[in-house]
Image (cartoon, helix red, strand yellow):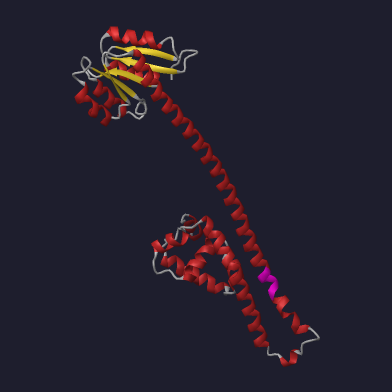
């Protein structure tokens, strides 16, 4: 935006009688404004693109292209669209042009003959509103950037929690059998009176309860960051079961079939078959990697 040193705002003045333009320039120049003048709207539009003024003052009626046509051109260009436009209109033009100008998003209409003090007051008020809006947008942008940074930190923390829970579950299941089986060798237990099948059953039940306990935490942590995951899968195939969704979540976490088998107490072969069924339900072609596909959901 072109500004003269020491000036706060840039104005573009166009149309009307040359004498009026010069009068407005002489009035605004000693103040905080850098003023540029163009005789017609065609040149004014080119100047607006070149200097990007803070505000444009234009006559309603001009030779060739009217002030309204200039307004339409300005609003139709994404670079000049935000520039506020103040119209100068004669008494004969005023009744009919007011609504038309405001419908075209004009900032203000000043009746001719123009009183410079009134024009200055209107221009100053418009630019103050614009300045306040910019300050508010800058503040909102700062808040947004801070919130975005907070969300990124929160996502990283949740991802770490999810990894820790997964590792804890895998580690716990790995050491469960020895922990649960310890009483079998204890002097306090008469192992001859215990049925080995019953012991195995109790160990398996203990492991399943442990997995269920940890699974709730894993699932909740995951869905905090990927709330649309289940919905996205269901959209792909409404007939997916809860087991399918659970298995999909584990594969989405990039766990291998062996790791999932160890966690869920389902045989490795069982997990492989379940994986194949899941691919068919999701209608995945052979070259599509299941884990990468699931990462693209939610």
Q: On the picture, is 264 further left or further right than 178?
A: left
User: Where does the image place residue 16, in percent across and percent down from the top left?
Assistant: 25, 13
Total residue callouts: 0
Query: Magenta part mainly helix, strand or loop?
Result: helix
Image height check: is 183 above or below 115? below
In the foreground, 236 or 52: 52
Q: Is residue 52 visible?
A: no
Q: On the picture, is 142 further left or further right than 161?
A: left
Numbered range of the magenta stretch: 172-176
Residue 148 in the magenta stretch? The answer is no
Image height check: is 273 above or below 74? below
Work out which quarter of the rendered image holds the N terminus and state it. Answer: top left
User: Residue at position x 53%, y 55% from top?
Assistant: 225
Residue 173 in the magenta stretch? The answer is yes
User: Where does the image place residue 275, in percent across and percent down from the top left?
Assistant: 49, 68
Image height check: is 21 above or below 50? above
User: Where does the image place residue 271, in percent across and percent down from the top left?
Assistant: 53, 71
Residue 173 location, quadrant: bottom right
Q: On the picture, is 79 further left or further right than 258?
A: left
Q: Is residue 129 visible?
A: yes
């Amino acid at each position: 935006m072109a500004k003269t040193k020491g000036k706060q705002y840039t104005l573009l003045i166009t149309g009307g009688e040359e004498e009026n333009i010069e009068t407005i320039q002489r009035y605004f120049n000693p103040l905080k404004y850098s003023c540029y003048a163009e005789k017609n709207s065609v040149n004014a539009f080119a100047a607006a693109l070149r200097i990007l003024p803070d505000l444009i003052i234009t006559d309603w009626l001009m030779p060739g292209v009217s002030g309204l046509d200039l307004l339409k051109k300005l609003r139709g260009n994404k670079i000049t669209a935000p520039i506020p436009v103040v119209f100068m209109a004669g008494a004969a033009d005023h009744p009919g042009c007011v609504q038309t100008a405001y419908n075209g998003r004009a900032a203000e209409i000043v009746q001719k003959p123009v009183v410079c003090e009134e024009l200055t007051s209107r221009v100053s008020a418009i630019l103050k509103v614009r300045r306040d809006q910019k300050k508010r947008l800058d503040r909102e942008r700062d808040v947004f950037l801070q919130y975005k940074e907070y969300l990124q930190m929160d996502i990283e923390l949740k991802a770490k929690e999810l990894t820790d829970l997964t590792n804890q579950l895998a580690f716990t299941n790995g050491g469960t059998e020895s922990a649960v089986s310890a009483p079998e060798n204890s002097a306090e237990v008469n192992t001859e009176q215990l049925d080995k099948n019953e012991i195995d059953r109790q160990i398996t039940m203990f492991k399943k309860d442990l997995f269920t306990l940890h699974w709730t935490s894993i699932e909740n942590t995951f869905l905090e960051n990927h709330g649309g995951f289940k919905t996205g899968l269901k959209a792909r195939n409404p007939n997916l079961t809860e087991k399918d969704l659970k298995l999909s979540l584990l594969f989405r976490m990039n766990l291998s079939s062996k790791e999932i088998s160890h966690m869920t107490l389902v045989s490795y072969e069982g997990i492989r078959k379940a994986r194949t069924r899941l691919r068919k339900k999701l209608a995945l072609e052979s070259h599509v990697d299941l884990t990468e596909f699931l990462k693209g959901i939610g």
